[in-house]
Image (cartoon, helix red, strand yellow):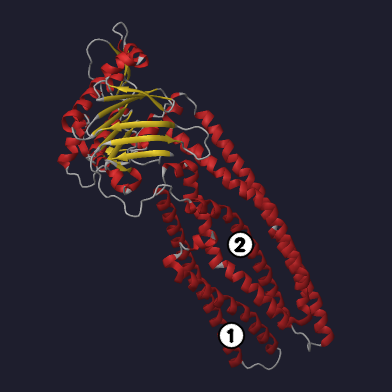
Amino acid sequence: MIRRLLSCVREYKKLSILTFCLMVGEVLIECLIPFITAELVNRMKGDLEISRLLTIGGILVLMALVSLTCGGLAGYTSAKASAGFAKNLRSDLFDRIQGFSFRNIDKFSSSSLVTRLTTDVANVQISFMMVIRTAVRAPLMLVFAVTMAFIMGGRLALTFVFVLPVMVLGLILITRKAMPAFHRVFRKYDKLNESVEENVRGMRVVKGFSREEYEKKKFARAADDICSDFTKAERIVALNDPLMQICWYFNMVFVLTVGSKLIIESRGLDLDVGQISAMLTYGIQTLMSLQMISMIYVIITISLESMRRIDEVLQEKSNLTNPENPVMSVRDGSIDFENVSFKYSEESQKFALSDVDLHIKSGMTVGIIGGTGSSKTSLVQMIPRLYDATEGNVLVGGINVKNYDLVTLRDSVAMVLQKNQLFSGTIKENLRWGNENATDEELIEAAKLAQADEFISSFPDGYDSFIEQGGTNVSGGQKQRLCIARALLKKPKILILDDSTSAVDTRTDAQIRKGFREFLPETTKIIIAQRIASVQDADMIIIMDNGKIVNTGTHEELMVSSPIYRETYEQQNNSGTQEPVVSDRGTEFMSGELTEGTEA
């Protein structure tokens, strides 16, 4: 795991090594300064010439400046290296997520992925900066300070024999008590982010049902839960300070008491004031180093949970990969399902699709109807290879989809979902997702075909009108038509509409289908719909139930052979009742002639 994460350092490796070297230099100088200071103090008791005093003082000032420079440069290089490491790590995570198949994405919630890309990467960044800076400085300072203390202080250095074990044992106990709480916090961050994401996305529903107070309380509970765990952990970690103070005062009392006694007894022959001064300084350095080590240990231990979560994503491999010699062109839009069965997880007991045997010629218009949960969407997701069939084969253009280059296959298949996504930007920018090189004339042509040009032209800025994130400033029907226009710009060999005209009125739906017949005769069109009127004129209508194809045929054939189809048709077209029609202004009821829906 560490090796995979460190591979993200890349171009910042030199800065990381330079930080290490600068910290070594800073520590060496800081440990030498008390030694020289002690010698200076001892010499001042004798006949020290003023020129010699100034020379030694100048050397100390120069050493302090060099140490300060090393520390400042180390701060700069470590910050740049850690920020660059985080940038590379975040980019690698995002690149890996972009390569995920739907099956991989199903393993992680969107809120969890957001947490890993933000909070977890930030934790690892802080940990990395401490490793290349503080984690170098603290152990070196500890070793050098203790070594110099024994050289300078002799028997006085025995204070560390008592202080160090107490400090180390105390820090181990503190961190062990604090770690479980820190581990719980990061798992709860996912739930907190999920609550925020869910609330923001469903803001209109929340306000529509006046559930603001409920959502506030729900968020507050999650936030309080995290706060409680953090508070508990921080209370334990805060014990570091009193522990250090106790050790520091013990060290100071011991050095001053025992040192003074030794000076008096030996009349300054075994020990002098300079050594006592140095011992106090080395004591501070030693205890500060131990405290820094404990802080490093806490932060790295916290970061380990973040590292594991990040590594889970980096290790996740897409189950959809290109073959060695992929086919780079799709001949036509013919589709064949050869005894296909499919389940979303290998552990699942039940197949979402079972024994599907289906053959669609290029250029055909195919309608698919069925109840909720009948696996209509699962069926069409096999075509652009968003999922692989568990059993059997799916062929496009006479070739198994597994033999195609993934980009080539998906560029030849355009899929419009019922809840398709628009992105923040102009209408032109959104449409050019289908073809980034499309001309303005091609944009208009696709929009006209999708019955979107009229309402786009009514906007003050036309095709340069800005779309808010998620398309919140356009109606449901307008959003669907923009998504259809975007798909048409791909000029696909296969066009799949997954209930993507549910928010438009029946007349606009009919005009869209008429445009498809007239202008896309060679494109295979698959239309999933709840309204039989949307698929009535299809070359073939497929009826699905419980993951199986229960009947196929034209409208006329199914009216004779399928009681379910006939009953559904009669319910939707009973002349004595009014049919609910979803339009851009909501649900309308109409009977008799179809009328144009009013834009929202």
Q: CA distance from mark 1 to mark 2?
A: 35 Å
Indicate which disc residue 512 carries: none
Report if residue 332 is visible in the image.
yes
Question: Residue 458 location, x and y as percent?
Answer: 20, 30
At label 2, the amino acid type is: Ile
Which quadrant of the figure has residue 144? bottom right
Q: Nearer the viewer, residue 63 or 94?
A: 94
Farthest residue, direction top: 576
Question: Residue 138 location, x and y as percent?
Answer: 62, 69
Residue holding disc 1: 57
Above or below, 307 relative to 275:
above
Q: Pointer 1: residues within 10 angstroms few (<14), some, or many (20+)?
A: some
Q: Pointer 2: residues within 10 angstroms few (<14), some, or many (20+)?
A: some
Question: Residue 101 location, x and y as percent?
Answer: 41, 45
Q: Earlier in the sequence, mark 1 or mark 2?
A: 1
Label 2: state its secondary structure: helix
Label 1: state its secondary structure: helix
Residue holding disc 2: 296
Q: Nearer the viewer, residue 153 or 165?
A: 165
| Lateral position of residue 204 relative to residue 4, left or right | left
At label 1, the amino acid type is: Gly
Front of the two marks 1 and 2: 2
| Lateral position of residue 515 relative to residue 57, left or right | left
What residue is drawn where x is 35% and y is 45%?
Answer: 402
Report if residue 277 is visible in the image.
no
Q: Are marks 1 and 2 in contact (CB under 8 Å)?
A: no
Farthest residue, direction right: 265
Above or below, 391 relative to 91:
above
Q: Nearer the viewer, residue 2 or 385?
A: 385
